[in-house]
Image (spheres, rainbow, N blue to C red):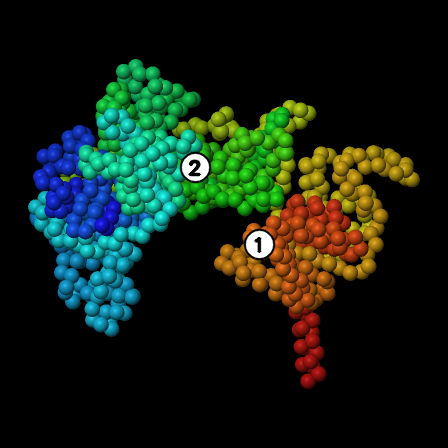
Amino acid sequence: MKKIAVGILAHVDSGKTTLSEALMYSSGNITKLGRVDHRDSFLDTFSLERDRGITIFSKQAVMKYNNTEFTLLDTPGHVDFSAEAERTLQVLDYAILVISGTDGVQSHTCTLWKLLKKYGVPCFIFVNKMDLDGADKLSVMAQLRTGLDENCVDFTYPNSDGFRESVAVCDEKILEKYYETDAVEKSDITGAIKERKIFPCMFGSALKLDGVKAFLNLLDEYTVMPSYGAEFGAKVYKIAEDNQGNRLTFMKITGGSLKVREILQSEKNTNAEKVNRIRIYSGEKFTAVEEAVAGTVCAVTGITFTSSGDGLGVEKNSGVPVLEPVLTYKVELEDGTDAHTALTKLKTLENEDPQLNVVWNSRLGEIHIRLMGEIQLEVLRCIIKERFGMNVSFSTGSIIYKETIENTVEGVGHFEPLRHYAEVHLLLKPAKRGSGITINSRCKEDLLDRNWQRLILTHLCEKTHLGVLTGSPITDIEITLVSGKAHAKHTEGGDFRQATYRAVRQGLRSAKSILLEPVYDFTLEVPNENVGRAMSDIQRMSGTFNSPEAKGENSVLTGTAPVSEMGNYTKEVMQYTHGRGRLSCSLKGYEPCHNSDEVIAQIGYDCDADVDNPCGSVFCSHGAGYNVPWNEVGEHMHLPSVLDAPKDDGIGTNSENAFAKCKTQDDIFALDKELMQIFEQTYGPVTRRKHAPEKRHVKAVSSIDKAAEKYKKSPVYDGTEYLLVDGYNVIFAWEHLKELSERSLDGARHALINILCNYQGYSKCNLILVFDAYKVKGEHREVETVNNISIVYTKEAETADMFIEKTSHKLAKTNKVRVVTSDALEQMIILGNGALRVSSRAFLEEVRQAENEIREIINSSNELNNNMN
């Protein structure tokens, strides 16, 4: 039997639950047609839902029709509970979007449409309430095509010529067949619907069962069951409790099968928890089964580690949700309940709805909770009373602000109390608005072990990092691990947690931060005589709007406005329009705050006094740790800054002459102050005896002095010059090649080879270009020759750094050897081997100079030939 998980979504009061009831009744799965207004609908099982006549929690029902088993998921329609609807989208094969025939496409309808697009869910559209006065099929169809997608197609008459033409223009493959055969295959339509190229639309009245059976047939005929793999996978979309207090984990099996007493495969399942029961719910009732196969939506008991959005088995975890609360409230305990007891109980609700974000403000001694709006506030109060017996109230909601940055900075965190050590360097870049936090790494494993890197990335993900303006969460930032350092004996996991947190805060403290506020997309419909007042109000609220659109005796304004200014405007609209106006809002996202100075001053957050989120670092001196303020960390850090561009250190084309003149280690390291700084930070200051007699041998007293002593005598060369080039280091250091590599790494590699071939022909050096291939399993070292340059691809487990180190050590004994790289560790090794290092930036200048001289020679030759002719 075909298994299809289909969800029903709609703007509030569109008749979504009524349609669910009608589909269940028309398919023969229930014998009595319930009604929302009669408080006896099959899926509104919660008492508060029946009292208020709205859906608060998503419900499921099994609906069998012909050879299809539908799992019908009814989701909340009110905007305050839209996060519940978004969580359900993660497990849908198809969606049914319900539109009111009298209201048409609303702002929240557009929000739901964007969510369907984000999660890639194919969609069927049912236009409801067509039996009411004011319902206009042509008008609604026009709104669907302009407001949602131009590929919304009326499926009322599927055998007509007009239908075939409408379907054909939605997909090139169908259109080509239609021109050839003048027919449209049903299988092609089904495939186009699955690929979100066609959105079938039908019209009717769910309350009167008009058009419901035809819509049911449409779902049966034009849906196709996904193909599932043999390996177990599941996606968790909801956490709840049954009447006996058992924790229920709702999930969809997306691969293989799940059996009772089986251990769920997840990194979070550290205690090897097993599934006690598997339940298939339909309304309030459930059926217990021993095994759930792929495509089944079920609830399991005995599991405590899961949360909404978790991927189990081969299934990946979900990303950051689009919809989120924008208001935070203080929980006030009215019956004298202990605050920590209340916090424990409220955390149970947070497990079921992660976006509640129940937090304990230790500074104020208060419990804070995040909600979408006033309706959710009232519902939550009732739930707390019913489940925990606590009487609570909530303070006036305050806006949830966020922070981001507008410039790229490096954040450094160092944690080195006695017998501890960790240093972390992060690159913080501003990202696209609404992108959230992106975390990645481009730190080399020979600089910091992979396990330490994974630990740092885990610490970046596990914490809500706070900004420095108001202490609000940060967003729209790309955080990249670029460098780090551990100690062989003293580094522990907790050290990198401290260093990572401090690196984020130090970077934020160094950047130019921006305060962001939530902004609504609104649709305001008012009588024509009130449109001037409405436009004035929106401008007063720092909002923007499009030109008013006439709609009979009313005018419609659409635009955006800050949530902080529009919070209570609905009541105001009802008052000045005498109940004839209507305001609909949906969250657009976060934008720069319109009154940031005022908000920052009002919140009064002191980032340097926040002991839970320090901006400075801890360094060690004389056996004791000491704090270093954020603005002085750069002077104490043990690794070089990644933002400091390599300087032209003078070791270039004529660097051999400068090197030959070196008589002491002071002269050697003076050639490269950058390397001297790295050596001293790693091994300690270089100490030397002063005022020593000229003929007396000065003994080195540090490891660096010892490493440099061998350069006191001028080396003897046989005249052969070698140039070793770290290929990928150069590609990512030269901007034009870096940009090319983002499109095609092979293209960047070939471009570098061509450049170096020209350079070798001009300089006449023995040029060896080295590329990493060490990650390729079973790879052997390969060497090829292209236009007199040798190109080396390293073998498995051999990095370019390792090859260059060994080769430079061997060649530098009797030859002039230069190495092109900007890798700090490689530079130190090169200097120790007796070779000369050239930064990638300095080498770029050499190449450009050579190209210019080649061009001048060619031009001179051409002029000479022209004169001779």
**Which quarter of the figure has residue 700?**
top right
Q: Is residue 747 visible?
A: yes
So how many labels did they put on this image? 2
Q: Measured from the top left, where is residue 326 in percent x and y?
A: 33, 35
- Residue found farthest to the right: 695
**Disc 1: CA contacts within 10 A as few (<14), some (14-19) or many (>=20):** few
- The image quarter containing residue 33 is top left
Disc 1 and disc 2: Cα gap in Å?
30 Å
Q: Amino acid at mark 2?
A: Glu
Q: Is residue 305 above or below residue 667?
A: above
Picture layout, residue 140 above or below residue 687 = below
- Identify the amino acid type marked 1: Gly
The residue under label 2 is 267
Secondary structure at badge 2 equals loop
Residue marked by disc 1: 778
> Which residue is depicted at the point 63% across and 41% down?
640
Of 563 and 778, the residue lying toward us: 778
Coordinates of residue 222 in the picture (x, y in percent): 21, 56
Give the mark nearest the N terminus, 1 or 2.
2
Q: Which mark is residue 264?
A: none
Q: Residue at 43% of width from left, 32% of height from top? A: 270
Q: Residue at x 56, y 58 (%)?
A: 737
